[in-house]
Each structure stands twice: as structure tokens, then as C-alpha cells.
Image (tube, coloured by chain):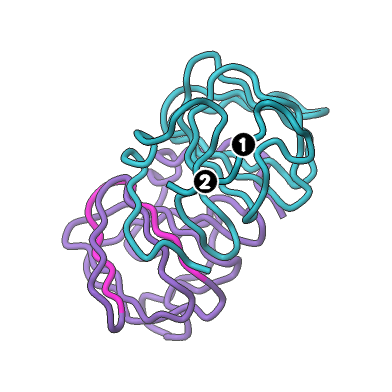
Chain colours: A purple, B cyan
């Protein structure tokens, strides 16, 4: 499904995201959802068996720790695809604004239930 | 497939895109490809039966004409999903830089063969 049938502005949507580690869904295309999130601090180690996860950094700096691989360091305009099933843990020393694209319905903490597990919500 | 296994910077990739209406592939995630393109002038009417097409405008202004619907007008940071099968024709009065996400292997002009039909190329 393709939705919404309207223009979506990244900055306007990010201005409406409250809290950290709580992605909000902006659009759906080809069974994938694009979400906006504000990140600060360290997340939890997890993975997504449903598919790859694309990060696009809008502002700030994000480090993605990867199991058995070197950390990936992202600044504004940087993108990285975390492969399906790969354990990873994002960290942001200062608040960082990102877009994240996942298979529709993916939970932010994967199979790990944590206080950081977020309900899906569209904005 | 998730690739490449490296950080991809949007501005750096766009600086290496030559010409107009010739998208270059930057990354693949979940069977979709994210491409960078420079657009100027009017494209050709076409559609993509393989899936929805996501546009993200980085710089400039883009109008997407849609069959039987009002035009969609996008500025920097704006995104829009053209639904699968819907005839559309992008127009940019001045040069516009965009990211486009399509099903892997989608041809820029859909089923229409035109002088604007581009070969797939990674950068």
C-alpha cells in the first residue's frame, strides 16, 4: 500500500516527535514504513528478522554498534543499511534526528521487550 | 540483499551524478533500491507496475503530475509516494536534486522507451 496520498515534510514531522527512541511512522511504500525518530543515549541490542533496516541521519551524530563488526559512524546526510538478522545497538551522545525504514510492522526493539519498546503510531 | 556494507553520504553521491533524469543507485535494502538523481525540465509520462515510487527532495522544487489527480508540489525535505501503476510525469523548472526509492531493477521510464530511459548504474 502507498500512503498517505499527501506530501510529507521531514522537518515538520520531526518537530512533532516527542521523546527519544519512539519512532513515528510517516509513510508506507512497497510494504515498508518510513519513520522519524529522535535518538539520545544508548538503545538496546536487538535485531530484525523481518528485513534490513535503513538509517538516514538528518541532524546530529549516530553510532551503530554491530555484532562482530566495527561500529558505523553517521553524520548528517549519511545513510547505512543494517542487514536483516544482524544484532545492532544505536548510540547517540547528543540528540540525533533520523529517518528509519523497516518492513511494515517491525518493532523498534526487535524480539527484545524493553522499556524502550515503542507502540506503532503514525504522525 | 543489504548493500553496500558502508556509509553512504547523500551530498557526496549527488556531487557525482552527471546529467538530468539519470538516477544512480546508492543502496539496496529489502529488495528496494535508493537512487540519487538531478532533475531539470519535463520527464515522460510513465508508470511502474513493479511497485510504489518514493520521492525525497533534497534541494530545489519538483512538481509530480499525476493522471486524474492534482499535481503534487515538493520542496526541500518533502516526500511523496507515487502509487504503483499510477501514470505520472515529474517536472522541475530549475535543477532539483532528489532521492528515489523503487523496487530493485525498475526502469526510470517504466514501460516507456524514450531518450530519457537510463541504464542502471551504481555510484
Residue tagged 1? B118
Image mark 1: chain: B
Q: Is residue A19 above or below residue A11?
A: below
Q: Quadrant of residue B48?
A: top right
Q: Residues within 10 Å of mark 1 (few under 14, many from 20)?
A: some
Q: Is residue B95 above or below residue A111?
A: above
What is the distance, in whole Å, between disc 1 and disc 2 at their CAs? 9 Å
Q: Which residues are magenta?
A: A52-66
Residue tagged 2? B121
Q: Is residue A23 left or right of residue A64?
A: right
Residue at 66% x, 57% y is A30
Q: Is residue A94 above or below residue A106?
A: above
Question: In what element is the residue under mark 2?
Answer: loop
Residue at 79% x, 40% y is B111
Q: Residue furthest left?
A: A93
Q: Position of residue A91 (x, y in %)?
A: 24, 68
Q: Are marks 1 and 2 on the same chain?
A: yes
Question: In what element is the residue under mark 1?
Answer: loop
The N terminus of chain A, quarter of image: bottom right
Q: Is residue A44 left or right of residue A54?
A: left
Q: Position of residue A5 (x, y in %)?
A: 68, 41
Q: Nearer the viewer, residue A61 or A117?
A: A61
Tell me if label 1 and label 2 are in contact, CB under 8 Å.
yes
Question: Does the stretch in magenta take in B90?
Answer: no
Is any part of residue A123 visible from this angle? no
Q: Nearer the viewer, residue A104 or A118?
A: A104
Residue at 64% x, 45% y is B53
Amino acid at each position: 500500500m502507498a500512503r498517505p496520498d499527501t506530501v510529507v515534510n521531514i522537518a515538520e514531522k520531526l518537530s512533532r516527535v516527542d521523546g527519544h527512541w519512539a519512532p513515528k511512522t510517516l509513510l508506507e511504500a512497497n510494504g515498508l514504513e518510513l519513520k522519524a525518530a529522535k535518538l539520545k543515549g544508548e538503545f538496546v541490542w536487538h535485531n530484525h528478522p523481518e528485513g534490513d533496516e535503513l538509517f538516514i541521519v538528518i541532524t546530529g551524530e549516530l553510532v551503530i554498534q554491530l555484532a562482530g563488526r566495527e561500529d558505523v559512524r553517521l553524520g548528517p546526510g549519511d545513510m547505512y543499511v543494517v542487514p536483516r538478522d544482524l544484532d545492532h545497538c544505536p548510540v547517540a551522545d547528543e540528540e540525533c534526528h533520523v529517518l528509519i525504514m523497516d518492513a511494515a510492522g517491525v518493532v523498534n526493539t526487535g524480539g527484545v521487550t524493553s522499556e524502550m519498546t515503542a507502540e506503532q503510531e503514525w504522525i
